Amino acid sequence: MTHGHLWDRLAEAKSRLAPVQSKYRVLFEDPATPDEPAKVLVPDPNFMAAALAGNILPSIDTYQRDRLVPDGQPKEHPYAEPIGAMSEEEAVEYLVMKDIDPAVWRDYNGNRTIMKIVPVEMIPSDRSFRNAWRIAQ
Amino acid sequence: MSTLNVSNITDGTDTVGTSYVVNGSAKAYVNFNGTGTIAVRDSFNVASLTDLGNGSHDVNLSSSFSAADYAVSGSTGGTNQSNHFNGGTNVRASAFNARVLVANVSTNDDAQVHAMAVGDLA
């Protein structure tokens, strides 16, 4: 049986999997905009459910290759073969590679730490403090 | 998972082409709390949210659109009734920016941020 389109697999997964709230957030700074507040990546609960279940999401390599594909050209990730189940930590690393610019997690050569994966309770809920916050070195 | 391969859908009286149904369906949606440590209430085809700062959030998609020319719409709620949604800034095939604006000039966190996107998937 063909594995079909990723969107169809996500629709089928949403109908049978309970959402999973991750206990992690990814805190990062963009080296291109050092004056902006630290950014927070929040995993989607339905994405986490799909990642933990397996056989729904494509390999992260397909997303990375698709970054180089111009708009309007065929992309690889929608029809790529799905991969197996991930742990929660692997799913968060997958999201880092998928949704954060490689300039932050792969290409940054500076001495400062600009990205951390942290438990959600470490993120300040008060925006006025968060906007003044920098990743502790 | 099985597939029905049909060109039209009918109830016996009215008929509609399946292409209208497919093209007209929202390909992604999200409902989230943009205050405090932001949290998703419900979603589809969303991989993650990125909290970029006050009232500005990137919605990162699992299954990308074919190009950055799809349509984003949304709404806000919460307690500040002057808030309104802006989804047309920084649209990319794999993500869009959902912002909550106040009086057109500044961004503001809102407890109710709803967004959906319609267009052609990759």
Image (spheres, rainbow, N blue to C red):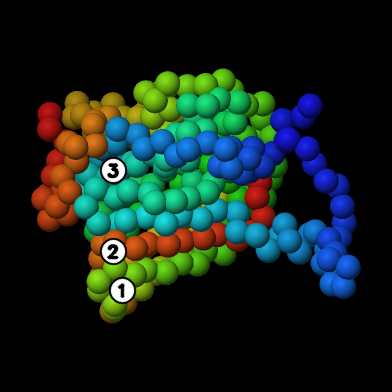
Q: Are marks 1 and 2 on the same chain?
A: yes
Q: Report the mark closest to the observer, 3 or 2.
A: 2
Q: CA distance from mark 1 to mark 2?
A: 8 Å
Q: Residues within 10 Å of mark 1 (few under 14, many from 20)?
A: many
Mark 1 vs 2: CB contact within 8 A:
yes
State the image coordinates of residue A39 (x, y, percent, origin top left): 27, 45
State the image coordinates of residue A134 (x, y, percent, origin top left): 14, 41
Q: What residue lies at 33% left-to-right and 41% top-to-bottom?
A: A41
Q: Is residue B44 above or below residue A106?
A: below
Q: CA distance from mark 3 to mark 2?
A: 16 Å
State the image coordinates of residue A19 (x, y, percent, origin top left): 45, 39
Q: Secondary structure at mark 3?
A: strand
Marked residue chain, label 3:
A
Q: Is residue B103 above or below residue B59?
A: below
Q: Secondary structure at mark 2?
A: loop
Q: What residue lies at 57% left-to-right and 31% top-to-bottom?
A: A57
Label 1 sits on what residue type? Answer: Asn
Q: What residue lies at 52% left-to-right and 21% top-to-bottom?
A: A85
Marked residue chain, label 1:
B
Q: CA distance from mark 1 to mark 3?
A: 22 Å
* Left or right for B77, reference B23: left
Residue on which disc 3 sits: A40
Residue on which disc 1 sits: B83
Can the viewer see residue A69?
no
* Left or right for A59, reference A39: right
Q: Is residue B36 above or below residue B112?
A: above
Say the numbered circle drawn on residue B105: none
Q: Is residue A47 above or below residue A60?
A: below
Mark 1 vs 3: CB contact within 8 A:
no
Label 2 sits on what residue type? Answer: Asp
Q: Residues within 10 Å of mark 3 (few under 14, many from 20)?
A: many
Residue on which disc 2 sits: B110
